[in-house]
Image (spheres, rainbow, N blue to C red):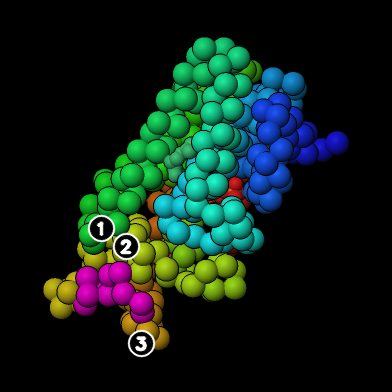
Amino acid sequence: MKNLEKIDTIMRKFISELGYEEVNFMFNDISLGKKLRSKLILNIAGCFEESLRLCAVVELIHVASLLHDDVIDDSNLRRGKPSINAIFGVKNAIMLGDILYSKGFFELSKFDSKIAKIISNSVAFLSIGELMDVNLSKNFNLNLDNYFNMIYNKTAILIEACAKSAAILAGYDYEKFGIYGKNLGLAFQIIDDVLDIISDEKTLGKPSMSDFRDGKTTIAYIYLYQYLDEKDKKKLISLFRKNLNLDEIFWLKSKFDEFKIIQKCINEAKKLAKDGIESISQYKNDKLIEIMQSMVDRDF
Ligand code: GRG
């Protein structure tokens, strides 16, 4: 059995231990994700019983956060398939999320207390990150620090916690791996936010530029605002939260091009990637370099 399949088997075992068939049934309808966090753990700590069990715990918590996120965003699609709230309704999606993360925390309590503290603390801030995201979406956000703080909590903090915990399992300097994990998470979210602008609807599985329509002033919009003259600044703000027509999309894209905004965002992600790789250079782990680079170079 492949390592990632072993993680799915452990997750299923955890869920079936709860002994309620309805939960197994709904859990089976959750489609599989990329398992970025697990790949990170296994490539730092190596693959053995305890590291695989940690992966299963983290994936349960991650999936629970996605179930709740889909409810908050009223989203009917997840991983290219109908979301759990779309199939079983909002109430079931919330309760299944509660069950998954609670079981995840129960299993986490069996680990070294340092690992249990790092992961559980990161999940509190993951939830705060979601709240920050919702709050920031109410207005046009011009503050880059607020954006970075939000994506650190919402996306990077759990990835950072995975890298630190795996380093503890392996007996490595966990602070160094924490920097790598944090930067991987930040770069991952920056690229995700850029792809919302440059990818087409087919690749994204949702309309292009939907972040801005949903109130998310991501890094490219914050940078663009800084370059525009007063008239265009007003125009950009007037498009916020609007269903854009083709002319407006064309205007936005031409402004992004004119000021090379997308390249600036990608450079920001590349700088984070470089610093992250440097922080663990003494460990000479080519696979971690590859994970970081493929995160920045991806086009989906
Ligand atoms: C119930 C634990 C719990 C938390 C509730 C809703 C919420 C608080 C947090 C949501 C946080 C969230 C959705 C952050 C986005 C993180 C992110 C980048 C998700 C996508 O990760 P991928 O691409 O997903 O690794 P796959 O599908 O590959 O697993």
Q: Residue at x 67, y 28 (%)?
A: 18
Determine which quarter of the picture holds residue 38: top right
Earlier-in-chain disc, 1 versus 3: 1
Magenta-tinted stretch: 235-244
The quarter of the image holding the N terminus is top right
Q: Are marks 1 and 3 in contact (CB under 8 Å)?
A: no
Earlier-in-chain disc, 1 versus 2: 1
For label 1, count other residues whose C-alpha is less than 10 Å away and answer few (under 14), some (14-19) or many (20+). Answer: few
Q: Residue at x 22, y 75 (%)?
A: 238
Name the residue beneath numbered marker 2: 215
Q: CA distance from mark 1 to mark 2?
A: 6 Å
Q: CA distance from mark 1 to mark 3?
A: 25 Å
**Hey, which residue is sitting farthest top in the picture?**
113
Secondary structure of the residue carrying tag 3 is: helix
Q: Amino acid at mark 3?
A: Asp
Q: Amino acid at mark 1?
A: Lys
Q: Are marks 1 and 2 in contact (CB under 8 Å)?
A: yes
Q: How far across and how far down the image is residue 145, in percent?
A: 26, 46
For label 2, count other residues whose C-alpha is less than 10 Å away and answer few (under 14), some (14-19) or many (20+). Answer: many
Q: Nearer the viewer, residue 215 or 72?
A: 72
Earlier-in-chain disc, 2 versus 3: 2
Residue 214 visible, this orientation? yes
Q: Amino acid at mark 2?
A: Gly
Name the residue beneath numbered marker 1: 138
Name the residue beneath numbered marker 3: 247
Horizontal arrangement in the rendering, residue 80 relative to residue 246 (left or right): right
Q: CA distance from mark 2 to mark 3?
A: 20 Å
- Of discs 1 and 3, which sits in the foreground? 1
Does the closest atom of ligand 1 sit within 8 Å of the Cβ of label 2? no
The quarter of the image holding the C terminus is bottom right
